[in-house]
Image (cartoon, rainbow, N blue to C red):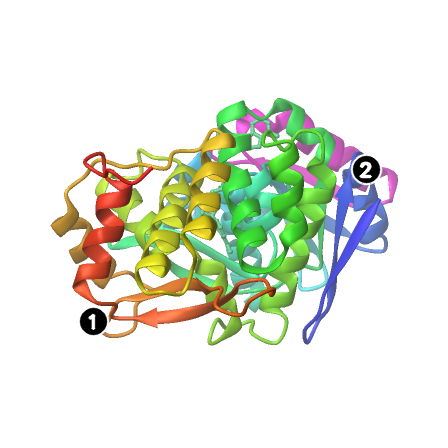
Amino acid sequence: MRRVTVAGDAPYEVVIGPGAGAELGLVLAGTSKAAVVHAPPLAAAAGAAVESLQTAGVAAEAVVVPDGEAAKTAQVAARLWDEFGRLGLTRSDAVVGVGGGAVTDLAGFAAATWTRGIRVVQVPTSVLGMVDAAVGGKTGINTAAGKNLVGAFHPPAAVLADTDALSGLSDAEFRSGLAEVVKCGFIADGEILRLLTEDPTGRRDTEELIERAVRVKADAVAGDLYDRGRREFLNYGHTLGHAIERVEDFGWRHGEAVAVGLVFAAELAGRAGLLSPADVGRHRSLVAAMGLPTRYAGDWSRLQAVMRVDKKARGASLRFVVLDGRRPGEAATPMILTDPDQAWLDAAWAAVSDEGTSS
Ligand SMILES: NC(=O)c1ccc[n+]([C@@H]2O[C@H](COP(=O)([O-])OP(=O)(O)OC[C@H]3O[C@@H](n4cnc5c(N)ncnc54)[C@H](O)[C@@H]3O)[C@@H](O)[C@H]2O)c1
Ligand SMILES: [Zn+2]
């Protein structure tokens, strides 16, 4: 089993590998009660979690919530609070979130708010959940005003990334999650890029890729739980990616939108003289080889307007994470580009929009 420790006020372990879920009983041994939150497609995995807990002497019960983003509402959170009350969960009890990022975000938020905070153990079942949503301590739900606008910083007690669960995940969801993995490669780990170049499906090296991506996220959040500094680099590809998601009314998968955003950010860095044409081309070719989109046909002025009101924008200025590869012989490192020249933005857009001529 692979193990990554996320440092902080309350350090925790991310366990990665086949059968990692079986450690649940161990992690929560001595706890008297637990609620295992899951959506219908993950009923079997939740059942295994309940069993593992019961064997360890924990009175565990499964609680079903809607699948996907439909779980992340105030109504569903309120239903969970009712269930926690019915189960009599106290401060020394625990919540377990089994599922994709939507369910772990919801379960984490419900745990953060129940009696002002009880432990949550996350059992992510999607690639995105394993490398991103379940790690780092951000939890939340959506409101009419937007996604993830209500939430809490509430680091988990442990994360059990059972790679056996991934066999049930669709290829499209798997690939979409890999967009976050390749993002981690670009900002901090050349070995991820090497592995994905050798096998762009990510199937051969899944565990190593997940471990490496978790390490990149763990390093970025350590000491920056509240998202005021280094953590922002994880936003690579996300400024345009989030705007595409919004403009598409979330009809695009997150990772697919981020994939286009990664190519756009590279093109932007190229225009700004920070990345060589070869580095820009590497973004495009690797993302394409992974079966992720590199182009997007859309309304550029609308996308720009949306980018300016991105939750992570500060004030009205446009901020992009870009790579600076100007030191010869050294790996490119992330930096923030604020309010880039309009000509660079337009040129980067031309390169990713369907009218683009750059290859
Ligand atoms: N908290 C954070 O830091 C953070 C970071 C990134 C993303 N997120 C959130 O994560 C969510 C997206 O997560 P996601 O991509 O996992 O989507 P998701 O949770 O909506 O899951 C996608 C689909 O895959 C299914 N699924 C998941 N695992 C499966 C498995 N093993 N077998 C079969 N089906 C499976 C789910 O039931 C769902 O239908 C968004 O709500 C996003 O806001 C949070
Ligand atoms: Zn993301």
Image coords of residue 176 (percent x, y): 48, 36
Image coords of residue 94 (percent x, y): 69, 54
**For the view shown, which residue lies furthest in the front direction?**
328
Image coords of residue 356 (percent x, y): 23, 39
Q: Is residue 91 left or right of residue 288?
A: right
Q: Is residue 36 above or below residue 339?
A: above
The residue at label 1 has a CB less than 8 Å from ligand 2: no
The segment highlighted magenta reads 38-67
Q: Which residue is mark 2?
A: 52
- The picture quadrant where one finds residue 336 is bottom left
Q: SS at mark 2?
A: helix
Q: Amino acid at mark 2?
A: Ser
Q: SS at mark 1?
A: loop
Q: Amino acid at mark 1?
A: Ala
> Residue visible at 57% across and 57% down?
111
Image coords of residue 308 (percent x, y): 22, 63
Q: Earlier in the sequence, mark 1 or mark 2?
A: 2
Q: Is residue 254 left or right of residue 52?
A: left
Which of the two residues, 30 or 128, is positioned nearer the viewer here? 128
Q: Which residue is mark 1?
A: 316
